[in-house]
Amino acid sequence: MHRWSITKWLFLIFLLSLTLRLLLFFFLLYGNPQGFYLDDSSQYWYLAKNLAESGIYSFSAEEPFWLNTTRTPLYPLFIAGFMSVGLGTATVVLLQLLLSSLTVVLVAYLLFKISGGLAAAIIAGFVLALDIYSISFANFLMAETLFTFLLTASIALLVSYKDFKRPVRAFVYSAVLMGLAILCKPIVLYLPLLLGLAIILISYKNFKTNLLHAGVFLVVCLLVIAPWFIRNNVVTGKFYFTTLGSQNLYLYRATDVYSRVNNLPFAEAQNILLKEAIDSFPGDHEDQPIEFNIYMRKQALDIIKAHPLTYLRNKTKYAAFLMFKPSASYLEVQMKSRFKYYPILYPDLSDIQEIWRFKLQNWDRTTLALVLYQFLMLILIWFGFIFGIIYLLRTKKYFLLVIVLLTIGYFLVIAGGPEADARIRMPFMPIIVLMSSLGAAYLLKLRRSSKKPG
């Protein structure tokens, strides 16, 4: 295994990754073109179409074009670039397949640099190349693949700052990519603050230098996303960043608490709370979307504060789902021509056994096999993750450990709600596999050492 150079291994991993993604691509292209799309794809499509044709940022299908403030611009611009030269979905997806495969190679190469050996790099490369969810979602007209590439590349540069003659460059490049990731999906809007803190605490001996590097990282990141703040101010008269956080907090997190406290089906509780918010809001919720979002956040926090233990209990459960829940419904969309996405977690079915009984009755053998494969791999990956932590502690690679744990923890806290599914795990899956592969390579090394005589 070790006779090959890292270059040959990376080429093989890239080839395997791209081939598997292309197999699904051609299946969809010639057998189920509708499988390239989810509900949100139409919004991205119309935003891109209107940008390419008239330079208007709106997902209205026809005039009047209402300017959009609910979607960040990078992915629509990504699609619009192809539309402007007459290319469509297939070309966009093909580039996503390349980005997905490059993400796999990037993680493998980063592990080679970190560990100084091939084992961890090879393990991570094959695990990510064979990751069902990455293969599936790279073939959707959705922002996740581009977002995952940008986030992974930003983290890779951040933890590799010592490889630069001038480390400040690593922080600048990382910040640019992190800013682009935020413009792709705003879920990581606050992650730079945590990463900046980690940069400051790299070493107490170089506190002033670390403080400078953290400042550079945060300022550059802010400069990248600042134009979108300005754009929203021009459109709405207020400085704010596009995010669905308030809506998710009210319509999912608070609704989940409300439904359980009042013993109501989730959908019914959601309709009740939405109606209450609209009726009690002192204004027009359609003409004042920013104020309405602020109002929903306040209402959501009031519900959560009234039942903190219920919220924390639910939060813990959904964080576990985010860590271990396999993907099924997205695969069904691609394999069965089902345009409508049905999540694996049905909030109306509070009994977990009932959820799985329902699913097992509706899955075919292919879906069942893919789900079982994902679940088994996730167990093995998280098992390796534990030993990855041990490895980093023993080798005193504290900065990498802190960056990995902060990134994963951030997603579990921010995205751990009833709306969470495997789709939200995808962006930080490369980070999980990175740590897990270090742990697996460490276990292999321990095993070899234990077999040596004497």
Image (tube, rainbow, N blue to C red):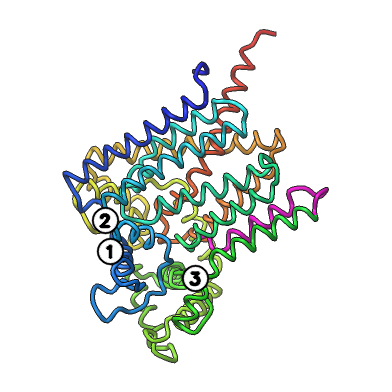
User: In the image, what residue type sits under mark 3?
Assistant: Trp
Q: Which residue is mark 2?
A: 37
CB contact under 8 Å: marks 1 and 2: yes
Q: Is residue 313 visible?
A: no
Q: Which residue is mark 1?
A: 42
| Of labels 3 and 2, the one closer to you | 3
Calculate the distance from the C-alpha at mark 3 to the C-alpha at mark 1: 22 Å
Q: Is residue 271 visible?
A: yes
Q: Which residue is mark 3?
A: 228
User: In the image, what residue type sits under mark 1?
Assistant: Ser
User: In the image, what residue type sits under mark 2?
Assistant: Tyr
The C terminus: image quadrant? top right
**Image quadrant in which you'd find residue 259:** bottom left
CB contact under 8 Å: marks 3 and 1: no
Asked whether residue 201 is drawn in magenta, I would say: yes
Dot 3 or dot 1: first in sequence order is 1
Q: Residue furthest left?
A: 31
Residue 320, position as x, y percentages in the image: 48, 50
Picture layout, residue 358 above or below residue 305: above
Calculate the distance from the C-alpha at mark 1 to the C-alpha at mark 2: 8 Å
Residues 136 and 308: in front is 136
Picture layout, residue 449 above or below residue 400: above
Q: Is residue 286 left or right of residue 148?
A: left
Q: Is residue 148 left or right of residue 384?
A: left
Q: Residue at x 42, y 88 (%)?
A: 280
| Of labels 3 and 1, the one closer to you | 3
Determine whether the residue tagged by mark 1 lies in a helix, strand or loop: helix
Residue 140, position as x, y percentages in the image: 31, 51
Q: Residue at x 43, y 29 (%)?
A: 11
Residues 74 and 378: in front is 74
Determine whether the residue tagged by mark 3 lies in a helix, strand or loop: helix
Magenta part of the protein: which range?
Answer: 188-207
